[in-house]
Image: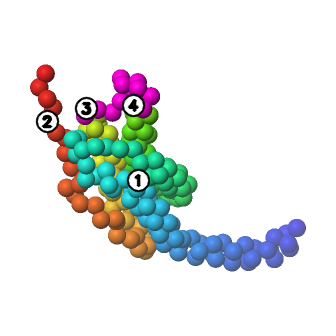
Amino acid sequence: MVRLTRRLAPIFTIAASLSCRQSEGSYQGYADRTAAIGDSALATVTSYLTLDSTSAVRYDSSAARNLERLATRFGGIMRPDTVSVFHRQMLEGLDSLVLAMRVLHDREVSCTQERTIDCVDTRDFGHVLGSIHSGVRVYLDARRRMRETLRALGAAFPDPPPVSPSALTSRVSPRPSP
């Protein structure tokens, strides 16, 4: 048994060193997948960023389905190391977007079923759009910090999708006085 262990020891050492070398390059693959999936999810809601509380806010079922699918895929590629904190924060931002779309959908369904108490009206637009703006800000802030961390680890993280800072500022109309 001792002889077998001595003979296998060099093989285990070589295998361990090869796996370490492979993991060094794995940050780049992770960075590429994270950016592609997360940014694609974010792109599904960019049309909502230009709306204000006086605009017609409509539920987009294909965008919502795509957002949920991509957010789920995004959560599945998390690494158990230094960047996982930022990955979780980016996922929180995407989850906020998913929830905002679900609320918008539920409210539209209620309106079509003539349960007007649950309909979207002008008072709701600010909250729904605020959730979308907040989710995008959380995602982009965490993405920026992840980019810095991955750069320090030797991986290039692509530029974020172009989102105007003014688009992240909620534009809520003044409330009517009672």
- Left or right side of 171 for 8: right
Is residue 113 placed above or below 69 in the rendered structure?
above
Q: Which residue is mark 3?
A: 123
Question: Rounded to the nearest whole Å, what is the CA distance between mark 4 and mark 3?
Answer: 15 Å
Whether tag 1 and tag 3 are in contact, CB under 8 A, the answer is no
Earlier in the chain: of badge 1 and badge 3, it is 1
Earlier in the chain: of badge 1 and badge 4, it is 1
User: Which residue type carries mark 2?
Assistant: Pro
Q: How is the image coloured?
A: rainbow
57 or 142: nearer the viewer: 57
What residue do we see at 43% from left, 56% from top?
41
- Left or right side of 125 for 139: right
Earlier in the chain: of badge 2 and badge 3, it is 3
In this view, the mark in front (2 or 4): 4
In this view, the mark in front (1 or 3): 3
Element on which disc 3 rests: helix
Q: Which residue is mark 2?
A: 174
12 or 67: nearer the viewer: 67
Few, some or many C-alpha atoms within 10 Å of disc 2 (few <14, some 14-19, many ≥20)? few
Question: Rounded to the nearest whole Å, what is the CA distance between mark 2 and mark 3?
Answer: 10 Å
The image quadrant of residue 106 is: top left
Few, some or many C-alpha atoms within 10 Å of disc 3 (few <14, some 14-19, many ≥20)? some
The image quadrant of residue 174 is: top left
Q: Which residues are magenta?
A: 110-123
Q: Which residue is mark 1?
A: 90
Q: Which residue is mark 4?
A: 111
- Left or right side of 78 for 138: left
